[in-house]
Image (cartoon, rainbow, N blue to C red):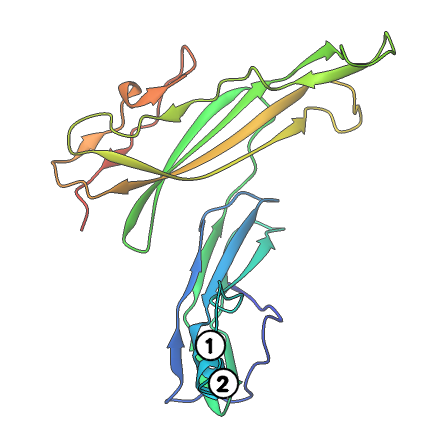
């Protein structure tokens, strides 16, 4: 397994058995090659330190930029990568984060289609819905140039999960990402695909095991065969 080291903070030189723990989280543990994930650290101790050192007549107001530290990481190879643990020292105390394992998979083929995956992270079942839809070049009505063309993406309807498809089952929408992909990178004005990725958390499901069904979706393309995905009761 590869380890990914980032120059996030000033790291302490030695591990300490008395180091205080900091939670390291990510929004997405199974990106595809070339995609990015976001890691987040809770840094409340910095704000607490500032509060303690302020004069009694002074008070912190507003949102703190120190509460969360977030950085994006782009993955440039497939395989398993470990992010963390990170060790650093602040105000005489040593802090150590936990670690996150990334499972980087191959990129999608440049063809129209729908791909659904179920992963588990932080004791939560997470559904990832990805889709490719072919873009269309249309005449740019706002341009005086009769040959001006633009990609039409506003009318595209991507598949999405229904929030409450049945009693007791809830899909909590967490994140969406979309962009265009050239089918042939050598031809910038050639055919392209609109890519969409939607991430959902399965929330507080307490029923029996159930298979993901077409009835749980909106805007599902015709003649799509879903993979066999089983949703289990939440822990």
- Relative to 220, is 157 on the left or the right? right
Q: Look at mark 2 in the image and give the residue it sits on.
A: 54
- Relative to 112, is 159 on the left or the right? left
Q: Are marks 2 and 1 in contact (CB under 8 Å)?
A: yes
Q: Decide which of 62, 171 is in the foreground and name it.
A: 62
Q: Position of residue 81 (x, y in %)?
A: 51, 59
Tell me how far mark 2 sits from mark 1, CA to CA: 7 Å
Looking at the image, the residue that sits furthest to the bottom is: 92
Q: Is residue 34 above or below residue 5?
A: above
Asked which quadrant contains residue 171, the reply is top left
Q: Decide which of 182, 55 is in the foreground and name it.
A: 55
Tell me which residue sits at (50%, 74%) in the image: 86
- Relative to 5, is 163 on the left or the right? left
Q: Position of residue 127 (x, y in %)?
A: 36, 37
Q: Look at mark 1 in the image and give the residue it sits on.
A: 59
Q: Position of residue 16 (x, y in %)?
A: 43, 89
Asked which quadrant contains residue 146, the reply is top right
Tell me which residue sits at (52%, 81%) in the image: 88
- Relative to 172, is 139 on the left or the right? right
Q: Is residue 136 above or below residue 59?
A: above
Q: Is residue 73 above or below residue 12?
A: above
> If you read the primary sequence from the N terminus, does the residue marked by circle 2 or circle 1 appear first?
2
Where disc 1 sits, the SS reads loop
The circle drawn on residue 24 is none
Disc 2 packing (10 Å; few <14; some 14–19; many ≥20): few
Asked which quadrant contains residue 139, the reply is top right
Q: Position of residue 193 (x, y in %)?
A: 62, 22
Tell me which residue sits at (57%, 37%) in the image: 107
Tell me which residue sits at (39%, 68%) in the image: 23
Disc 1 packing (10 Å; few <14; some 14–19; many ≥20): few
């Amino acid at each position: 397994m590869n380890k990914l080291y980032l120059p996030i903070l000033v790291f302490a030189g030695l591990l300490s058995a008395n180091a205080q723990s900091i939670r390291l989280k990510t929004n997405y543990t199974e990106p595809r090659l070339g995609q990015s994930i976001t890691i987040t650290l809770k840094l409340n101790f910095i704000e607490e330190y500032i509060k303690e050192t302020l004069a009694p007549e002074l008070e912190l107001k507003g949102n703190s930029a120190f509460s969360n530290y977030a950085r994006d990481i782009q993955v440039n190879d497939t395989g398993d990568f470990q992010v963390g643990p990170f060790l650093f020292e602040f105000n005489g105390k040593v802090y150590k984060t936990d670690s996150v394992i990334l499972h980087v998979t191959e990129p999608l083929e440049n063809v129209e289609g729908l791909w659904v995956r179920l992963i588990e992270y932080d004791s939560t079942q997470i559904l990832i819905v990805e889709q490719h839809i072919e873009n269309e070049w249309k005449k740019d009505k706002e341009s005086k140039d009769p040959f001006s063309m633009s990609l039409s993406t506003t009318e595209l309807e991507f598949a999405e999960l229904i929030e409450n498809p049945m009693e007791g089952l809830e899909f909590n929408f967490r994140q969406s990402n979309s962009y265009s992909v050239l089918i042939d990178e050598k031809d910038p004005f050639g055919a392209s695909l609109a890519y969409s990725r939607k991430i959902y958390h399965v929330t507080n499901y307490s029923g029996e095991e159930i298979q993901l069904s077409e009835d749980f979706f909106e805007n599902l393309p015709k003649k799509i065969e879903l993979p066999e995905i089983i949703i289990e009761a939440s822990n």
